[in-house]
Image: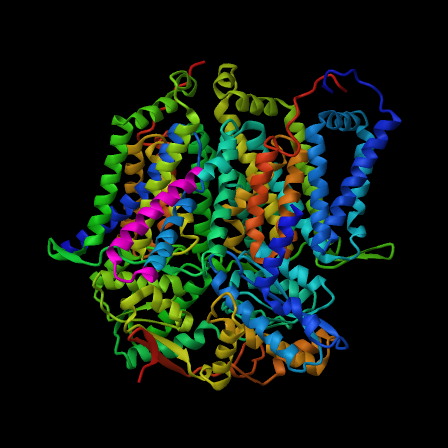
Amino acid sequence: MDALVLQYVMNWLVLGCIYALVALGFSLLFGVLNVIHFSHGDVVIVAPFVVLAVLQGLVAAMPAATAGALALALAAAILAVGILGVIADWLVIRRFRRAPAMMALVATVALGTVVRELIRMFYPQGSNPKPFPRLIEAQVALGGVTVPVFSLLAIAVSVAMMGLLFAMMRFTPLGLRIRAVAEDRATARLMAIRPGRIFAATFFVASAVGAIGAILFASYAGAVRFDFGIQLGLIGFSGAVIGGLGSMLGAILGSLLIAGIDVLVQATMAEGASYRLVFAFLLVILVLVLKPSGLLGRPAIEKV
Amino acid sequence: MSGILTRRRLVAAMALGAAVALAPVAVAQDKPKIKLGFIGPLSGGNAPQGLGARNGFLLAIEQANAGGYPYTVEGVVYDDASDPQTGVGAATKLVNDPDVVASIGHWNSSVALATIPVFDRFQMPVIIWGAISPKITEQNLPMVTRVTPTLVTENKPLAAWAVSGLGAKKIAIVADTSDYGTANAAAFGQFFAEAGGTVVSTDLLPVGTTDFRAVLTRIAGAGVDAIYFGGVITEAGLLRKQEGELGLTVPMIGISGFYDPEFIALAGPAAEGTMVSYPAAQSNPRLDKLDADYTARGFAEPSSPYTKYAYEAANILMAVIRDKGIEDKAALAAAIRAISYDGVLGTTTFDDHGQTQIPVEVIIKIVRNGEWVTRE
Amino acid sequence: MAAAAPARAATLADRAIVAAGEAGGALILGLFLLAEDWRLITAVLVLCGAGFALLELRPAIEERIVAAFRRAPATALVLGAAIVLAYPFGMQGNSYALHLLVIALLYAVLALALNFQLGSANIPNFATGASYGIGAYASALLALEFGVSFWLTLPVAAAVATVFGFLLGFPSMRTRDTYLALVTIAFGIVVHQLLNNFDWTGGPNGLVGIPAPSILGHSFARPIVILGQRVPAQANFYYLALALVALAILAARRLHNSRVGLAWNALRGDELAARCQGIDVVWYKMLAFAVDAFLAAFAGSVYAAYVSYISPDNFTFLVSVTIMTMVIVGGMDNSFGVIVGAFLLTLLPEKLRIFSDYRLLFVGVVVILFLVLRPQGLFPQRPRSYGAS
């Protein structure tokens, strides 16, 4: 039975880490801009499509260099989706900076539809699912069971990205500026920080990190389809919220929690699979009833 | 704004199929003009099924128009987006148009169940090309017939074969929570038990699930002889791929819902050895010709397993309209039920509830070397 | 502002503006409903767009129109009622146009229901679709399993949904804004999944053969014949849905002018300040959820009886988002604006059918354009006016 338990644990960790990469974007954007970017999931799911397109182009051009082509495709996808995030902000989201929160939410739900439909119509045969390659096919023996190297890689990449993001926020000038803008936009402006650039940078970082999550997601599932971003986005959003918006550690914790209940319900309950979303979202409600600002969110203290 | 709209409109018209735009030019003007309706999911996650079927429908009309059919037929295509309310809107729009004589419709049973009262109340014959819920024909509405077999027809022989031919004693059932998945799981589970096998577990996953590892790990722990999957292509491909990764080597079986090259493309090498039942009567020269014509026509979308059903449904409508004219809808509906139609599906006849009676003798198709072949 | 203007008797010009406004609106709606040619549809849309651009550029025109309606309420009411009651007879027996009207009216009820929360009190709620579904299922199950008359299921379904509304309102005691939004999203998903998974709700196949109501021996499945004029059966439900909208508007007015409406507006302004004023914040928040659920359930019951079939797919998260978009696009806390929003977002996707595959894309783009170009909504909320009448 131990081997099975290990497999469940690996499954949980990989899913949790992938969701966390998406949740981090939600949390970062909310922390800095106070905005809910509901189309985040749909924007980042563009990344696997870019990978496939670039791979196809490169393999056609020079069939020999496959490893190099993959690296190039991944880099191109992350960069492209980062830029796409900035464009989404510039075209739509930035117009709702001063509007009530729900307006940005509704506008980005519509934006998500637009992004999905654009993939569907402009990617060749975009309605159909696309097989997505395993980044690494090898397997290793671990505690008596064979574990795909990919799973370990996914966890490692996620942890590394989280570490990098923390380091960026803590130790780099950009991180300092982002935190300054998040703290107080007007004062930051007085310190010669341009909030507009910081917003663009935040969108770039959040989308690029999410793109890595989406690529890992597609690779782990084995395929990508234009509407896979809906559930990825919804679960990432939920992870970020129950963790406490604006808290990076919270986003990771929340994502692990949702992935955990998902795997647990399916592993232990006879008819659990059909109720997996029911349990996941009941957990969301429960957490928010007990901790209204999420697990690690700053409790809202208001001055009169 | 209007300039953009015009360009988009042009693109849309082209995507819709040149037939609709060109038919009045290409055909002599003296023939009376009629319209036939089509409804199906053309956007959203089920769009591949709907688009393939729509192309089958348009192809049938094009061929009729080119082949001396006594009317000039125009296809009216509406999207139901897999949403019952949108479907009712589309159906109401069809019945309200006096030129539309009859219609075919729906992949989702929930949408079909919502629209058939509309078709029935406003007296328009409708042939269901994709939705498989038994409830649709159980109501026995005079205007409604269906060319798709219900799930019972394929699951029963498959379950019997799984026990006797494959030798599976214990089986795990996986499907989705849609009408298609739940009905498949229930039908197969019942027939497999009747045939003497044991259903170890039944797992239904919400539509949109992309990770099956938790369920598969539990199935691996239970030690089964085979896995039955009762869903559609995408999920079937993902499930099979993830099975391979978890080292679960038992065969996967299912009905013809995911008999599709797309499944092999998705599952990759793991697809090897997957077996599905396939109605034997479906393999005939007419079907091969349809496949060839479809390729030659150069549609933007690939064919789906439902292309042939929509094609056949459109042809049956046109056959009865040729005989009975366009005025008496009740006579048309009665003629559909009385028909014995030789086409791509074999010889279609309907029972007293409007359900197709095509005999299903299934053969087993298996993936070998990355291709579907008939299992000896 | 009109509020500051002294109360004057309605002039002939006021009455003319009111009459022109109402007749013009009815005419444009009719034109849009009956239009089949994409050029005509585009032209009507461009006309409406130009109208709103004019209002945006010349606010004085808008003020004049509002003032006219305010000074001639009797004219507006009588003429409006006459137009609305006679409307089905002007549809040339087009059952599709009538169907669209019925659906639009039901969405207007849903949007008005949500408006109590979102507009009046700024409480986000993405579960109106779920309340709509609970009402529809409660009513349909009562009718199918126990043969209860539609008219009796109406209040029972509303009561059931209201209980759920209170339940949903419970977490709102402490959570706010985005966190509360997620609670309602989660509630909506849970309800949808459970409706899909339970056997007694018919599972994914839903409930078939819900009977149409009848009144004084007249079945709602039959056409209406008055003075030799015959209108399709959809007209029955048009009048039923119309009554529901009237009820919702009346409730909105009464609540707006009552202590409850004031308390909600205070919550919208500043929750903390409201609490300091001695307003029972928790009670009024939960009340907002309950009122939303109550009205949404009515709409659900009528929908079930109208289409005679419901399934979980009718009540997804997307439906809730659509309802919220209607409120925001139309104009928060403005009943008329919300109704216009509901009509626009119901009719637009149907009329964009001409764009086939591109339909969803266009709907998305149009919604974003509306939000960007007129963020305060088509008909923005108006400050409370005292002493004008």
Q: Residue at x 25, y 58 (%)?
A: A65
Q: Residue A171's spot in the image, x, y percent?
A: 25, 26
Q: Residue at x 50, y 69 (%)?
A: B134
Residue extending furthest toward the left: A144
Q: Residue at x 79, y 38 (%)?
A: C22
Residue B371: in sight, yes or no?
A: yes
User: Total marks drawn?
Assistant: 0
Left or right position of C200 against A77: right
Residue extending furthest toward the front: A61
Which quarter shows the N terminus of chain B? top right
Does A75 lie within the magenta span?
Answer: yes
Q: Residue B80's spot in the image, x, y percent?
A: 57, 59
Q: Is residue C19 above or below residue B148?
A: above
Residue toward you, C221 or C274: C274
Q: Is residue A187 above or below residue C192?
A: above
Q: Is residue A80 above or below residue C226?
A: above
Which quarter shows the C terminus of chain B? bottom left
**For the magenta stretch, what is the residue range?**
A59-86
Q: Would you identify the image quadrant in which residue B239 lies?
A: bottom left
Q: Would you identify the image quadrant in which residue B12 lies?
A: bottom right
Residue C236: in sight, yes or no?
A: no
Does C322 lie within the magenta span?
Answer: no
